[in-house]
Image (tube, rainbow, N blue to C red):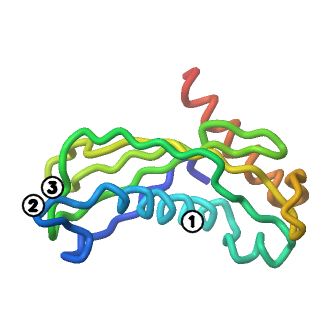
Amino acid sequence: MSTTCEATLRVRYAETDQMSVVYHSNYIIWFEVGRVELLRQLGFSYLEMEQDGLNLPVVEVRCRYKSPARYDDEIIIRTHLSQMRTSLLRFHYEVIRKADGKLLAEGESAHVVVGRDMKRTHLTGKYLGAFHAAAEKTQSAVRG
């Protein structure tokens, strides 16, 4: 299991503005694409978490725009778990243009773990183990 997930997509015309530049809010959507794919890489889907009574609402999101993405660019969304507590997860994202490797944007999102009742709870079972393993690998990579 890798600590970093890479999801690739191509910028659609509908995601651009009148200047042919990707509209800023689409980066937040792309962060979700990366996050969902990272969960799959960890061995489960977000749908499974929901069915098991756990949800991860966004409580904070930030994006730093570096260079514009444009229609038909192929981009890579690189995602990793940057912080993990039993009731809080923080993800880091990089959006990179595949053709030249240019960093287009980077950001972070924080998520609390809540139950079906929308009250804060803790990760359990397979989710706790998978996120803990991912956090350990990330910390090892940072140290090493």
- The crowd level at tag 2 (other Cα within 10 Å; few <14, some 14-19, many 20+) is few
Disc 2 designates what residue? 19
Kind of residue sitting beneath label 3: Ala
Does dot 3 land on a helix, a strand or a loop? loop
**Residue 108: image x %, image y %?**
51, 42
**The image quarter in which residue 88 lies:** top right
Q: Residue at x 61, y 67 (%)?
A: 40
**The image quarter in which residue 26 lies:** bottom left
Could you tell me how far apart the alpha carbons at marks 2 and 1 are, in whole angstroms?
Answer: 30 Å
Kind of residue sitting beneath label 1: Val
Kindly report which numbered mark, 2 or 3, lies closer to the viewer in this rendering.
2
Disc 1 designates what residue? 36
Q: Which residue lies furthest to the left in this view?
A: 19
Q: In this view, does 15 lie to the left or right of 138?
A: left
Kind of residue sitting beneath label 2: Met
Check the image and report above or below for 71 versus 135.
below
Check the image and report above or below for 121 versus 60.
below
Disc 3 designates what residue? 99
Q: Which residue is drawn at 37% across and 56% down?
A: 27
Question: If you read the primary sequence from the N terminus, does the residue marked by circle 2 or circle 1 appear first?
Answer: 2
Q: Residue at x 58, y 21 (%)?
A: 143
